[in-house]
Image (cartoon, rainbow, N blue to C red):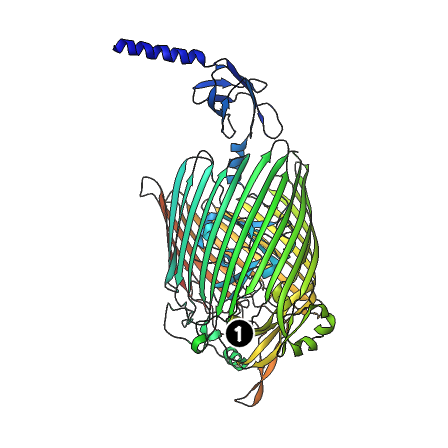
Amino acid sequence: MQKLLIFCAFLLCFYNTKAQNCTYSLKGKVSDFHDNTSIVGASIHIVNLNKFATSNFDGEFVFNNLCEGKLTIEIKHIACETKRIVFTLTKDTFKEISLEHHLEELKEVVVKTNTKTEVTSIEQSLKKEVITNFTDKSLGDALNTISGVSSLNTGNTIVKPMIHGLHSSRLLIINNNVRMFDQEWGDEHAPNIDINASDRIDVVKGANSLKYGSDAIGGLILIKPKKYAIKDSLFSSTITSLNSNGFGGSINYEIVKTYNSGWYSKLQANYRKFGDFRAPDYYLTNSGLENINTSFRIGFNSYEKGFDAYYSYVNNKLAILQSSHIGNVNDLVAAINSQKPRITDDFSYDINYPRQSIVHHLGKVEAYKRFKNFGKLSVQYDFQLNRRKEFDSRRGDLSNIPVIDLRLFTTSIQPDLQIDYLEDFRINTGLLVRYQQNDAVSGTGASPLIPDYNKYEAGIYAIVNYDLNESTEVNAGLRYDYSRIDARKRYSLSDWNDKNYDVLFPEFETGEIDGSRIVTRPTFTFNNISASLGISKRFNTDYAFLFNYGLAQRVPNPSELFSDGLHHSAARIETGLLTIGKETANKFVASFERTNENFGFSISPYYKNINNFIQLIPTGIRTTIRGAFPVWEYNQVNAQIFGVDIDINKKIANQFDYIGSLSLLQGDNLTDDIALIHMPSANFSNRIVYKNNEFHELKLSIHQRTVFQQNRFPDYNFTTFNPTTQQDVLVDISSTPPSYTLFGFNSSAVFYPFKKGSLQLEFNVDNLFNVAYRENLNRLRYFADELGRNVNLKIKINY
């Protein structure tokens, strides 16, 4: 019986085999994705049948006598990305298969060289190693290490980057290919970015920014994620940082999973907490912070197609020095004339009033597809939700209610097309559609500084790159932008008429009168044209000359148009003007560079002429029910900014390196023939580094930074009446603090106590000699010194 069953089963299998058609053929051709040339010697493997073939001189291959069914084919070639395709064979079939030739070699080049935004761009970069050194600090602190980059501070925790003296709306900050919008108009509004989520930060000082916007008068900051290799891998890291000043620190964790198929994912989280920081001689009462940041990323990466989805959450609680909370101008006079803050309590982790609370959500989805013999099309959708609350010292039921509560929603869609099938000629073109809504949340018990508004934007750009020869490349671009702002705002009837708005803008009036206030609906439309031209000339493997010209136009932001009231965290009254128009800047930047590890340098002069430059300047005082406060008003002047950035690196000996930089800048108000306000002063830095790779990759360095006194500043001093002395007193808000020099020490070593992974230890000291100083570009310089000595220990574990 058993033999009969076996015989029947054999007959059944034989019948099925005979019934199945196994006479089909699979033919194909393997060619280069870009130029369609044949790829010789590619290995073609039918995985589920374990059959092999090799492409001939014409790139062709053939499999015969194949059965109907599902086939999984893997195509390999040296210096190419392995490709896998799956399909069902139902007839004789011919397949054209394209591989990205030399892709693996190109990946190695990317790792070893300094890739730029554009070949002709003038930029500097912070790599992951440097970013890790600032794991418990801000984006502005990290960028301060780059020549030509400074910061506008509010204390030591609110740090706004400046490039060549320009900040806020004149800088484009691009985070993971998304332009940041987080109420950046305020002097004391720092970018809501966790630099630990990034792999590299590029600062573009030239005009190569048309892809991202028309208004990069100052420059462009690109915060880039890591591009992961296509392989099966799982790795993670933990960085713990401990600090003596502020008795706090941070912990950052990330885990990354990649697959040979091209899929990848990353989860990152960071927590940072500090108490009151300390100047050399006293605690800075109410200067701590608490941050919670996290991000998640998932995507698929191959040469021909892929996508990337990213989400980040930033929650910042920032204390503002309590001594800077003034009740009137006389408090400001007393602070200026005093050597110490009026409040110097003992150390505390409490975050009291005044303070800021900011929550920022950012999400994006980007997908791309490459087309053979054409280029790459990508489409990105992104959104941001920013909620900013500013708290002041208030009485009774208002104590926990913010005086400013703003909710800003921004969303955009951006298709981008790169045409790169021609070897020497590349075109990048794209569109932008963006919508933004600002909501001044009611219930604060105070008039909103910025009103409700809707903003609509659309743009189109085209950028051309052309290789004149092997050593010369040219870049040119043109961009058009349309923007419209629709606002709803209440004005005092007396202010509306005194400023002649009833004559200039009668179309804004709704006819609705609320007591002594008139309800208006201001609407503004702007059309911007921007352009760029760049050239790069390499003289040999070391030397290069670069030149950029840029035409940039910036529309006024809503704060410059509509500000009207007491800005509590800034302790001043700010007033905008409806008559303010757009800025137009002509930018010229050049750079002569030598890239050589034994001796390298870059000399980068620049000049910017800005028509209708919008500035915020003090104009006097105004008495309110809260007291007398300085009044700062927006106006427009013609301006120029010029200077030079110099960087040098020199190998002193086999294990010793020198790195130095010098930045010189001058800003002029051409209309009034005076200096521009808030311009950084001349500064230089030097660093000597010792490396011993054979002894635990030991690295020791000592660095010095000198900032000179700013002797060119406008005189915006004014007088106020002191009711105590019954005399007029001078309010000196213009004079600048003296020069200062700081020293620091850094050290690190790497150990391998585990079978896999490593342990890196760092020991650092900032302000080594505990120098007491004040920084001209710190808005709180009237009230307190900068930070004293800080001892830092970092522990980084890779596993």
Q: Return the residue at label 1.
A: 446
* Location of the N terminus (image quadrant): top left
Picture coordinates of residue 590 (x, y %)?
66, 51
Residue farthest to the bottom, as pictured: 726
Tell which of 173 and 406 is nearer to you: 406
Dot 1: within a 10 Å radius of its alpha carbon, few (fewer than 14), some, or many (20 or more) residues? few
* Location of the C terminus (image quadrant): top left
Q: Residue at x 70, y 70 (%)?
A: 673
Picture coordinates of residue 382 (x, y %)?
55, 50
Q: Is residue 313 left or right of residue 644?
A: left
Q: Residue at x 65, y 64 (%)?
A: 667
Q: Is residue 583 visible?
A: no
Tell which of 609 and 77 is nearer to you: 77
Residue farthest to the left, as pictured: 1
Whether residue 216 is situated above or below residue 1 in the rendered picture: below
Picture coordinates of residue 598 (x, y %)?
53, 44
Picture coordinates of residue 313 (x, y %)?
46, 55
Q: Is residue 242 left or right of residue 665?
A: left
Report helix, strand or loop for mark 1.
loop
Residue 101 occupies quadrant:
top right
Q: Residue at x 34, y 40 (%)?
A: 756
Whether residue 407 is situated above or below residue 413 in the rendered picture: below
Tell which of 222 and 446 is nearer to you: 446
Residue 722 occupies quadrant:
bottom right
Q: Is residue 505 left or right of residue 174?
A: right
Q: Is residue 360 visible?
A: yes
